[in-house]
Image: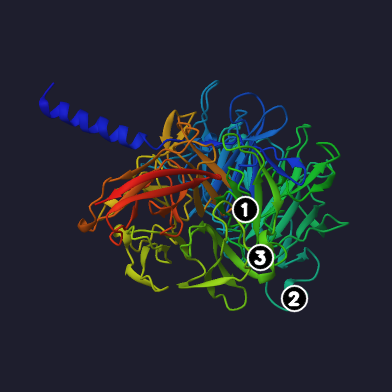
Amino acid sequence: MSTKNILLGFLLLSFLVSNAQFSYTLDQSIPVEINGKELAMPWAGGINASQVNTMDLNDDGKQDLVLFDRTANKLITFLNQDNQYKYAPDYESLFPNTITQWVLLRDLNCDGKKDLFTSDPFGIIAYINTTKAGAKLSWRPYNPDAQNYPKPILSKGFTIPVNVKINSDDIPAIDDLDGDGDLDMLNFYFIGPGTVEWHQNLAVENSGKCDSLVLQRQSQKWGGFTECACGIVSFQGGKTCDQLINGRAQHNVGKSLLAVDLNNDGDKELFFSEQTCSGLFLLTNEGTPTDALMTQLTPFPAGSPINLLTYPVAYAEDVDFDGVKDLLVSPNISVREYFGTNFQQSVLQFKNTGTAQLPQFTFVKSNFLQADMIDVGDGAVPAFFDYDGDGDQDLFVSNYIKTNGASQVSQFENVGSATAPSFKLVTEDFFTLSILNVINIKIQFVDMNKDGTMDFVFSYTDRRTRKTELAYLANSSAEKLSIKDGTVKSIDFSLAESNNWYVVDINQDGLNDILLGNDLGGVEYWKNSGTGLFELVTDSYLGIGASTERQNVTLTVADLLADGQADLLLANQSGKLFIYENFRKQSTAPAPITSVFYNSLLQKLESRNLGGYAWLAVASIFNTREPSIIVGTTLGGLQILRFEDAAELPDEPQISIYPNPIVRLDEKPIYIRADRSVSVQFYSPLGQKISENYFVPANEDYPINVSALSAGVYIAQFSWRGRIFSKRFIVQ
């Protein structure tokens, strides 16, 4: 082998080893109790607006659960284990990465395995399930082009095949409508009035085989009805839309369809909703399988109609393991459109108390799966602090808005231990912050007033003016959270509602600076002037400037590898994590490390969508040298990224001070490094206190300026969990 090849091999190995340092698994082991109930899967990350499908993910013959949440553009997978759903995120990576807007799992080729339909800018595309027995889930494009990308599905129109084109917010019905065994399609007419097109699949008619899509548009007004406006329909032979609403029917908003035979007569009734409606409607079919005739529109359910902000969409799947399909309803929205949308209760479950032939849907609950996980609504921002001073990390989670119209902070006490955490909800309204009547609270614990205690720092947005402020509540205790002065103290710093911020001493001068993720995707560095004001140093810190690929990045700084070097963590609207290793030693940002999640199915590290916008906190919740990353999501939940093979911390803090002795005239600081976060005060040899408390973050080289000290021996007194440790250092 040549010297050149040996060198290349060595460089490649070095690269792989370097990147393999960051390896995390999604940990789901920590128990969580809310209102006396232990949650079944507390760390699943939350749900907002999910489309519901089932399929066999692991080839065990059981139907598992696959959700697609539009607000995070994310698939969420659950395994059916003993008739209970268990969050199984590794399966999410086995699906095509082109899924967008919506996904429906249907058996296209009648092989007993569900295939995949999803949106495309030019219509609808499909993937065929090619999974072999005992193998991992796999797919191939249906009707691929030269780049092996699925071509849009075609249907023969008046003369030639054309794309089945639908609005990006529409969800079509893909089902066997004429009873011949192959899949047909219904969709709202793309450019015309509110009528439904029927694309009949002629695969069986032409070849006798149910193995493909041979679509032909048979009607542009299937069922003989026209949707005029929300809850108003013109039926065949009845009043026109002009007569009903004094105007033409419009098709400028999203519409969804679900075809279900409710009376065992062979034809399909239609569950229907549209983007401007908060209700779901049922259209009764009195026609035949090949000649539908809708005659009646009723709100569903008849006794107590759904009122869900907004655009409630129905899905028929068996989710209670009794062999008959139930009805699930969730809003089909990509962003929060109304303050009144309740993202804690946005997946409605109706149990089929009838039969497969004659279904009867009975309401069960409005928080299907959401009740089994931490879900604070949307915009979950986590923070950790030993609130009660008992030696373990407690959890705080803020949200964008609650159903009372205000943002709140949930407080969870760690009722376990430093090595075996267990969380219990104490309150959903910490410090009764709801009385501020604001939205968009984001939180961090940091010593804001430099008194050696960790303060509760938060930003919030006024609902009326949409002005965003940064403020804090001062903590009066170095060992726990004790807010004696409840005055909200403003910080003179300008924010936009969508900005994300992180308070950290960037230049290690002992003053807290601010990193800001701005609207254009850049990272701004604001230096603390020492006078209570912050000065903009750069709007593209480390070269991370404006970009069309990211928006309002979230930021956190922590020493992830416990190597004494702080790392910069970023996340953006894609839900992906970016790690900039040892960032203070860089003049420009190196290529970020993104493949940090170990997938046990693929047996490799990968990048992953954690749940749309992601807010990051870093804490040693397992009492390990390498901390965990806790991620709050757009979906209102949390996920825990646990460092693989993390070393357990010793019983006592390992603390070093260097250089020791220090030459005062060199005007260089001494550095303190501890293997866990501690506070420190300095004393003269006579025991006289000569400094305030300093908070020393774990595993960082924390600088202390000693140029004002006279030559002599001094004592650094460290405090950790109520225990005191002392070290001497010499100033020459």
The mark nearer the N terminus, 3 or 2, is 2
- Residue at image location 48% in from the left, 54% down from the top: 122
Q: Is residue 151 left or right of residue 329?
A: left
- Helix, strand or loop at disc 3? helix
Which of discs 3 and 1 lies nearer the camera? The answer is 3
Whether residue 371 is situated above or below residue 58 in the rendered picture: below
Q: Is residue 107 left or right of residue 716?
A: right
- Helix, strand or loop at disc 2? helix
The residue identified by callout 3 is: 433
Q: Nearer the viewer, residue 724 or 301?
A: 724
Quarter of the N terminus within the rendering: top left
The residue identified by callout 2 is: 245
Q: Position of residue 68 (x, y in %)?
A: 59, 46
- Residue at image location 58% in from the left, 63% down from the top: 441
The residue identified by callout 1 is: 171
Q: Nearer the viewer, residue 359 or 241?
A: 359
Toward which corner of the image does residue 272 lie, by quadrant? bottom right
At label 2, counting other C-alpha atoms closer than 10 Å, the crowd grade (few under 14, some 14-19, many 20 or more) is some
Q: Amino acid at mark 2?
A: Ile
Whether residue 105 is situated above or below residue 164 in the rendered picture: above
Q: Amino acid at mark 3?
A: Leu
Q: Is residue 532 left or right of residue 709?
A: right
Q: Position of residue 30 (x, y in %)?
A: 62, 37
How far apart are the alpha carbons under marks 1 and 2? 25 Å
How far apart are the alpha carbons under marks 3 and 1? 40 Å
Q: Amino acid at mark 1?
A: Ile
Q: Are marks 1 and 2 in contact (CB under 8 Å)?
A: no
